Image (cartoon, helix red, strand yellow):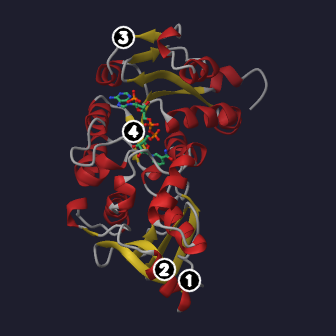
Amino acid sequence: MSGPYKSFRMKTVKLIVVGFGTIGKGVLEVLRMKRKYVEDKYEVSLLVAAICEVSGTLVNPKGIDIDSALECAQRGKLREHPDWKPIKTLDAIKDIEGDIVLELTPGDIKTGEPGLSHIIAALESGKNVVTSNKAPLAIRFHELTGLAQKKGLALGYEATVGGAIPIINLYRDNLEINQVNSIYGILNGTSNYILTKMFEEDITLDTALKEAQELGIAERDPTYDINGVDTAVKLVILANSLMGKRISYKDICVTGITGVSTDSLELAKKHGYAIKLIGDVVNMEVSPRLVPLNHPLNVSGTLNAIMLDTDVAGTLTLVGHGAGKIQTASSVFSDIMDIVRG
Ligand SMILES: NC(=O)c1ccc[n+]([C@@H]2O[C@H](COP(=O)([O-])OP(=O)(O)OC[C@H]3O[C@@H](n4cnc5c(N)ncnc54)[C@H](OP(=O)(O)O)[C@@H]3O)[C@@H](O)[C@H]2O)c1
């Protein structure tokens, strides 16, 4: 909207960003790109009221300047930012005025912390939550979604599964009358990259992993990617949110990709198959499986693919980037925009 009435009608939505790592920075970069679009279309100004890091918090009720915050973070000198204050994350979440807490920290899969406490504190203090952190959802899915419902607040977790693939909100907004009979998915880009490289270049898992680490695709500690735990955690979130199940990641039988050899891939190829790490909700299992070369789940590199079998819409397959700071920020914004519209 343009013209003299703009400032009268513009509503402000205050964001509290918790965790200023890859995704936190990606979200601010996308906000910088798309802020005007949101203002023009919805007459809503998205303002960053706080950015919480382990060492302290940037706070500015009038809105933190995104360029300078990103620039200080780039130099590893967030403390030098004029808005820096020695406020602890939980205190910031409870005490700083805000509409949406963006919970973007890494989660411990055994405890769900620190994200679990962040999400509970945000909801308890009347703030909506959008998170990319799968651990708290995988451990306490129904408790957290129940708390949000009780408080009349939103808890968006689109970015926890499949990176940029908008599977959760697609189901909620467009497939609600469908019963989902099964979900199969390639939900971990690192293991898919490794299996693709082993298949295409006949190299060992160790060599493919080393290459993935050099390219920044695999983390320094890729244990959860390789042993299938990351896939299991995402499968739990899909099963609970799309199929109404009440499971946690301990209910999934998990086998990773460490047992996949170049010989087994060679044999599979000879018979027209690839080997993929598949999450399967029906059998509550994550395991390497044979996938026909012309099957929609045979996606390569870091791509993710999710196949739903439904009673009305039939079979749907979604393919997209399973990670990446800008791609994942797209899913974070899917949830933010839902709150802005609602
Ligand atoms: N990267 C991706 O492509 C991707 C895709 C989908 C989902 N995710 C999920 O999104 C979340 C963030 O991922 P990321 O890649 O951005 O991780 P990251 O680069 O490690 O960033 C996380 C940030 O959170 C900070 N942090 C940790 N504990 C905190 C606390 N108590 N209070 C405030 N800040 C805290 C960390 O600070 P320190 O460095 O000082 O510990 C770090 O700066 C994770 O749960 C991840 O699984 C990531």
Res. 8 image quadrant: top right
- Mark 2 to mark 1 CA distance (whole Å): 16 Å
- Mark 2 to mark 4 CA distance (whole Å): 43 Å
Rendered location of residue 190, percent (x, y): 48, 58
First-in-chain label (3 vs 1): 3
Tell us which disc is closer to us: 2 or 4: 2
Which residue lies under the disc numbered 2? Answer: 265
First-in-chain label (2 vs 4): 4
| Residue situated in front as seen by the camera: 150 or 218 | 218
Rendered location of residue 47, percent (x, y): 56, 24
Disc 2 under 8 Å from ligand 1? The reply is: no
Element at badge 3? Answer: loop
Rendered location of residue 93, percent (x, y): 34, 25
Q: Quadrant of the N terminus?
A: top right
Q: Give me the disc on residue 295.
A: 1
- Mark 3 to mark 2 CA distance (whole Å): 53 Å
Quick check: 26 above or below 298?
Answer: above
Rendered location of residue 61, percent (x, y): 49, 14
Element at badge 2? Answer: helix
Q: In this image, 277 relative to 76: left or right?
A: left
Q: Give me the disc on residue 86.
A: 3
Quick check: 34 above or below 305?
Answer: above
First-in-chain label (2 vs 1): 2
Residue count near mark 1 (Cα–Cα under 10 Å), binned few <14, some 14–19, many ≥20 = few
Which residue lies under the disc numbered 4? Answer: 129
Element at badge 4? Answer: strand
Q: Amino acid at mark 1?
A: His
Q: Amino acid at mark 4?
A: Val
